[in-house]
Image (spheres, helix red, strand yellow):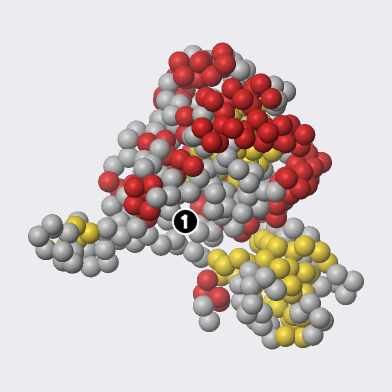
Amino acid sequence: MRKTELLVPAGSLDVLKTAVIYGGDAVYIGGEAYGLRAKAKNFSTEDMKEGIRFAHERGVKVYVTANIFAHNDDIKEAAAYFEELKSIGPDALIISDPGMFTIAKNVCPEIDIHISTQANNTNYMTYKFWWDMGAKRVVSARELSLREIKEIRANIPEEMEIESFIHGAMCISYSGRCLLSNYLTGRDANQGACTHPCRWKYALMEEQRPGEYFPVEENERGTYIFNSKDLCMVEHIPEIVDAGIDSLKIEGRMKTALYVATVARTYRKALDDYAKGEDVYRANIPWYHEEIAKCTYRQFTTGFYFGKPSEEAQIYDSNTYINEFVYLGTVSEIDKQGLAVIEQKNKFCVGDPIEIMKPDGANITVEVLAMYDEKGEAVDSCPHPGQEIHLKLSETPKVHDIIRVSNEIAKR
């Protein structure tokens, strides 16, 4: 069996640490330039250095995205950017543009290069091409079936790596090459500035009757004709491994720490259980489903893995997430009084039953006995996001534990 890597996204330093603690074998991040998630917080040079140090100390790799489709002006500064990355020392660069690939190969040949899914990698000859150019890994296009990936595996060098998405948002456009955002808003998805028009509500307007809107499909809630369900392959780990995929990639560099922790922890357990035996893995499938549903999602699909998806892979009546739990914060320290310190993300109150989410898979329901602001003054609730809060709970958590609350409690 090939060694299988769990690759987890991070849009900020705090989320990178969460990804590492909650089970990632590798983390992919974006710098302040050349990545396809311009709206993510992304990493400054200093944060990138700290993140790589934190990950490497725990045996986790870090990959940096530089996967825009570069224009002439981008190329002019690329060499200087790769020189900077060379000094920082990530484990690999994720690139889609041949020009950017050439510059990176010249500037930092000692850093592995992975070819992004944006490069439209749909056949084994493409994989061989990139291997001959010096790439170590190619990310498969989302449009491939497991049968096709297995055929690619059989026709490329044994030491070449295949990376495939196994969880997260799907794109309506082929291999993410979308022009909708650029056309409708002037913001280029292929330069990292996508406004996600695939999630908008659409209607039909006839030229001679401006202002009169007709639903594309008869539904009083609107029509979301481009709105895909989210990919989820947690109950298909045996098939994924059998296809010869080396790295299982979770989508979501703009997601919260709660999302990243929940998904990473669930897939970590699924992979570890499968390594123990398929019977162990299959016995725990209900737990994987229960846990994966505790973070935001749009309903699930298996995408193209078992053939071309039908109309059932789309969501036509809503573009909103299902959200069963609310993120309250991550424990950054235990203070001298034994209180858990968090940067609060959402409001909760003294007396609320909340949940401590631990990296090992445990979920512990506790009561908020007291809370104090940064001045040490007792407060009954914390309504201001970003506030430093010191918590006395019925059970003391540990640093890096995540605090969350069910949506039912949060809505009270």
Callout 1 amino acid: Tyr
Q: Is residue 82 above or below residue 52?
A: above
Q: Which residue shows up at 39% across the image and 33% down it?
A: 143
Residue 28 location, x and y as percent? 63, 41
Please say whether residue 19 is visible from this viewpoint: no
Residue underneath mark 1: 297
Instruction: Answer few, some or many: residues within 10 Å of disc 1's Cα (few below 14, many 20 plus, some between 14 and 19).
Output: many
**Whole-percent x, y for residue 133 in the image:** 57, 16
- Toward the left, the furthest residue is 208
Placement of 263 over or under 144, stated as above or below: below
| Residue sitting farthest toward the right | 336
What residue do we see at 69% from left, 25% from top?
Answer: 107
- In this orientation, which residue lies closer to the viewer: 361 or 161? 161
Residue that appears at 58% across and 25% down: 101
Q: Quadrant of residue 336?
A: bottom right
**What residue is drawn where x is 18% and y is 67%?**
211
Q: Position of residue 174 (x, y in %)?
A: 37, 36
Residue 79 visible somewhere in the drawing: yes
Secondary structure, mark 1, is loop
Q: Position of residue 409 (x, y in %)?
A: 56, 76
Quadrant housing the N terminus: top right
